[in-house]
Image (spheres, rainbow, N blue to C red):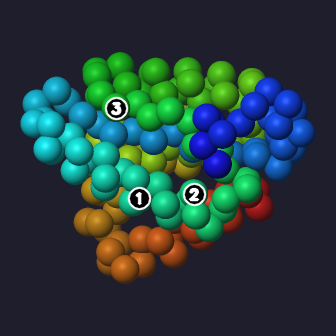
Amino acid sequence: MKFSEMTQDSWAELQLYLDTCLIPFTGLTGNHSPAEATEALERLRDFLDLIEVPFKGRVMTYPAFHFAFPEMSMALNTICEQLKRSGFKYVVIMTSDGLLDKDKISSADLVFNRSQMVEEIDEAKIAGYVGEKVREMWKN
């Protein structure tokens, strides 16, 4: 579910079920042409589908961070902490092309970096891996 689909009344009603916040990170640097930026957004959209589709009804997707900057990890940690204070139990960050150091984003429950995953996991197994990690997070 997208944040824009939620009203104040429906949030109060569904908050118990929507316990996981998904933060997309595009990772644009400002050096991309419009066509390259569009392609990056499309890759991120497709990567987000690995969580948004199978876990619809439990995951709320928030607005994306599009541009990378040097203090990105600190900003993402702060956002994760604030989202948890606002009622989310879990926060997951996903990027298709951006560079994120998972160790520096300790407030996120999961950080998925597709470009790094492709180097470590067979592309055909990424969806299963992501789903497995999300289910493990919910069990713990």
Figure check: 126 above or below 101: below
Q: Callout 1: 10 Å neighbours few (<14), some, many (20+)? A: many
Identity of the amino acid at label 3?
His
Identity of the amino acid at label 2?
Glu
Residue 34 percent coordinates (x, y): 15, 37
Q: Callout 3: 10 Å neighbours few (<14), some, many (20+)? A: some
Figure check: 84 above or below 37: above
- Where does label 1 land, which residue? 47
Q: Quadrant of the C terminus?
A: bottom right
Residue displayed at 76% across by 45% down: 19
Q: How many marks?
A: 3
Say which mark, if any, is on residue 52.
2
Asked which secondary structure carries label 3, the reply is strand
Q: Which mark is first along the chain, 1 or 3?
A: 1
Identity of the amino acid at label 1?
Phe
Residue displayed at 42% across by 71% down: 126
